[in-house]
Amino acid sequence: MRFFRFLPLVAVFLSLPCWPVDVGDAWMRAMPPGQPTAAAYLTLRNPAQSTVTLLSAATPLAGKVEIHESLQQDGRWRMRRLADLPIPAGGTATLAPGGAHLMMFDMQQPLREGDTLPLTLEFDSGESIDVSIEVRAIGAGSGHQHH
């Protein structure tokens, strides 16, 4: 009978988002001199039991950062801005070349291979995560591509 006294506490504990979003494989390609834009890629894992949404991102090295998606339309590749990016409960959102990505505008300086870019991600849960984006060679891929 004592166990039943703790059921309300267990219910509250289970309803709380207990783990933050996990960020992995955060990278971008090195930038040629004079290029004012860059794209960043990463994987977002949501261990919570409800959807978490990426609302925005920011870095002190760019004027603005937007969430974008690449899609093929009428035989041409186009980019469109996304208002946000949902990460399903217990699921993953992958930002990768040819799909969703973070587009950075008005870069203050070109980043070279071996540099890092500080980035802050803001979620609808109120959570904020600071990420260090690895700058890889200009022709780099994610490192997780299958041949």
Image (cartoon, rainbow, N blue to C red):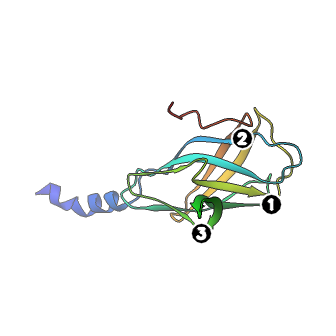
- Give the mark, 1 or 2, whose residue is nearer the N terminus: 2
Q: Residue pushed farthest bottom?
A: 83
Residue 73: quadrant of the picture = bottom right
Rendered location of residue 130, percent (x, y):
64, 49
Residue beneath the point at 80% across and 36% down? 112
* Mark 2, residue position: 29
Disc with the residue nearer the chain's start (3 vs 1): 1
Figure check: 109 above or below 49: above
Which residue is depicted at the point 19% across and 61% down?
5
Q: Quadrant of residue 115?
A: top right
Sequence-wise first label, 3 or 2:
2
Proximity of marks 1 and 2: CB atoms separated by less than 8 Å: no
**In this view of the protein, which residue sits in the foreground, 130 or 65?**
65
**Pointer 3 residue:** 83
The picture places residue 64, in percent across and down from the top left corner, at 75, 61
Residue shown at the point (34%, 61%) measured from the top left: 15
SS state under label 1: loop
> In the image, what residue type sits under mark 3?
Ala
Say left or right for 81 vs 114.
Answer: left
Side of 113 where 121 appears, left or right: left
Q: Residues within 10 Å of mark 3 (few under 14, many from 20)?
A: few
Amino acid bearing label 2: Arg
- From the image, state whether disc 1 or disc 2 is nearer to you: 2
